[in-house]
Image: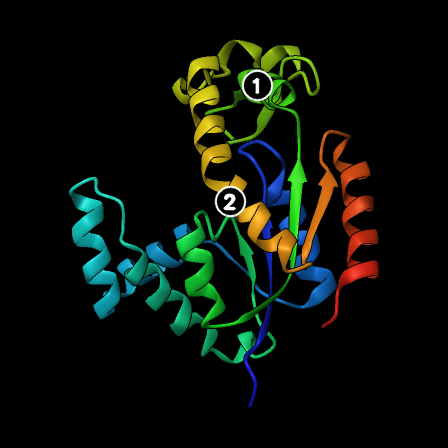
Amino acid sequence: MGKSESIVLFGPPGAGKGTQSGLISQITGKPQVSTGDMLREAVASQTEVGVKANDYMEKGLLVPDKIIIDLIRMRLLREDAKSGLLFDGFPRTLAQAVELDGLTNVTMVLSLVVPDEDIVNRITGRRTDPHTGEIYHVVHRPAPDPIKPRLVHRSDDTEDTVRNRLKSFHDQTSPLAEYYSERGVLVPIDGSGSMEDVSKLVKQSLINNFRG
């Protein structure tokens, strides 16, 4: 039996991966997974890998690639992952991409491309309602007047923090884009439009490129 066939979705913070991953999963039938979700589940379940991961997390250290890969290997053994998974924000480095290739065939990589200035404007303008968790934007989605006084501007949504995160993203993913482009599976998508416009582009890309 051959390896499963999976999809990778990546893009800078604030590019709308969460929204589009739900759409991709719905269209392809591949369960969406993120390493953060898998780590939290493994820690909560107190699996052997989860206990190891928790040792690093409690010390504020990055969880080593070997543990992440072990989590993915186990996730791919589940019944719903027989035809592969949709990886949201993984791999982040070339080494992780090579390891992932040993577990599943990555047949499509959707890359949401958004200019840095757009990302900065999107994130720095976000405001959260602490009562409901609802997220608003000072320009694109203003909150109703009655709740504006209680909105919170998250401390990590400042311009300096966002630009640092973007630099880290570009440093890590530039080699990844080249790696997947050379294999002919990279599909760049203009993520600068509205959520609806980007969803249309994602759907069209799946129609044109998705091979099951």
Q: Which residue appears at 42% of the width and 23% of the height?
A: 164
Q: Percent from the top left, x then y, of residue 139?
A: 68, 13
Quadrant position of the C terminus in the picture:
bottom right
Quadrant position of the N terminus in the picture:
bottom right
**Residue 206 appears in which quarter of the rendering?**
bottom right
Q: CA distance from mark 1 to mark 2?
A: 23 Å
Disc 1 vs disc 2: Cβ atoms closer than 8 Å?
A: no
**Residue 62 appears in which quarter of the rendering?**
top left
Quickly name the residue at label 2: 175
Quickly name the residue at label 1: 120
**Is residue 85 positioned above or below 206 on the image?**
below
Q: What element does badge 2 sit on?
A: helix
Amino acid type indicated by mark 2: Pro
Q: Percent from the top left, x then y, of residue 176?
A: 53, 48
Which mark is in front, 1 or 2?
Answer: 2
Horizontal side of residue 126 vs 62, given as left or right = right
Horizontal side of residue 127 vs 22, given as left or right = left
Q: Which residue appears at 25% of the width and 62% of the height?
A: 50
Amino acid type indicated by mark 1: Val
Q: Percent from the top left, x then y, of residue 73?
A: 40, 72
